[in-house]
Amino acid sequence: MYRISATRLAMPIVLGVLVGLVAVHSQTAGPKPCEGPEYRQFDFWIGDWRVEGRGGKLAGTNRIERIAGGCGLQETWTAATGGGTGRSLNGYATDDGKWHQVWIGSGGLQMHLVGGLRDGSMVLEGRTIDRSRHLILQRITWTPHDDGRVRQVWEQSIDEGKSWKVGFVGIYSKNP
């Protein structure tokens, strides 16, 4: 004689209740975090890029991707020569209404930059200390172009912002 256990009878009911609870929760949970337009301000930088420096010479490649459910961006940089690499995490912070980037490079440079959109460009600024213990102001500006490319300008100031020197200009073109 075949017996059906209480566990076997209850299993479809339990699964049905769990599926129902998940469905109700997903409908009543409200908006997902990081869906506002402020979280999309830096989306023009997302992609797999070929980065050219002075004279159109390949400076490296850069992969920018959304992470953490769309709440941030991760950058993975690889220099064309010298083996240099680096990574950054980027995100919009609701507590101060600004974008933040934390960069760590294989050459030892670490930066925390803060800023936001200015006239259609993402401008992030911060401070670093060089090996001689001198303060250096850092400013990086990313500007999207109509053709899909992005221009990055990295500037530094050693006189507390009175004057700025361009250290790098890169043109980002999407990898085919």
Image (tube, helix red, strand yellow):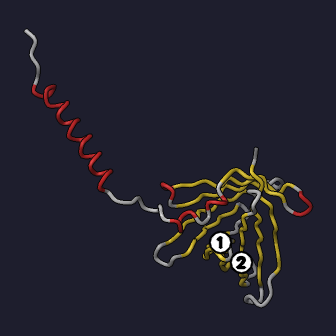
**Dot in front, 1 or 2:** 2
Dot 2 lies on which element? Answer: strand
- Residue at the outermost top position: 1
Q: Residue at x 63, y 62 (%)?
A: 88
Q: Is residue 1 above or below residue 116?
A: above
Give residue 162's position: percent from left, percent from top: 77, 91
Q: Residue at x 68, y 72 (%)?
A: 120
Q: Residue at x 77, y 83 (%)?
A: 157
Q: Which residue is mark 2?
A: 138
Residue type beneath disc 1 = Met
- Residue at the outermost front position: 146
Q: Residue at x 76, y 72 (%)?
A: 154
For the residues bearing labels 1 and 2, Cβ distance under 8 angstroms: yes
**Left or right: 40, with 122 as reference point:** left
Which quadrant is home to the N terminus? top left
Q: Which residue is mark 1?
A: 111
Give residue 168's position: percent from left, percent from top: 81, 69
- Decide which of 119, 171 is in the foreground and name it: 119
Gap between marks 1 and 2 measured at Cα: 8 Å
**Left or right: 114, with 153 as reference point:** left
Q: Is residue 65 above or below residue 111?
A: above
Q: Earlier in the sequence, mark 1 or mark 2?
A: 1
- Residue at the outermost left position: 1
- Decide which of 61, 110 is in the foreground and name it: 61
Structural crowding at the residue carrying mark 1, measured as other residues with C-alpha within 10 Å and reported as few (<14), some (14–19) or many (≥20): some
Which quadrant is home to the C terminus? top right
Structural crowding at the residue carrying mark 2, measured as other residues with C-alpha within 10 Å and reported as few (<14), some (14–19) or many (≥20): many
Residue type beneath disc 2 = Gln
Dot 1 lies on which element? Answer: strand
Give residue 127's position: percent from left, percent from top: 67, 80
Residue 45 numbered tag: none
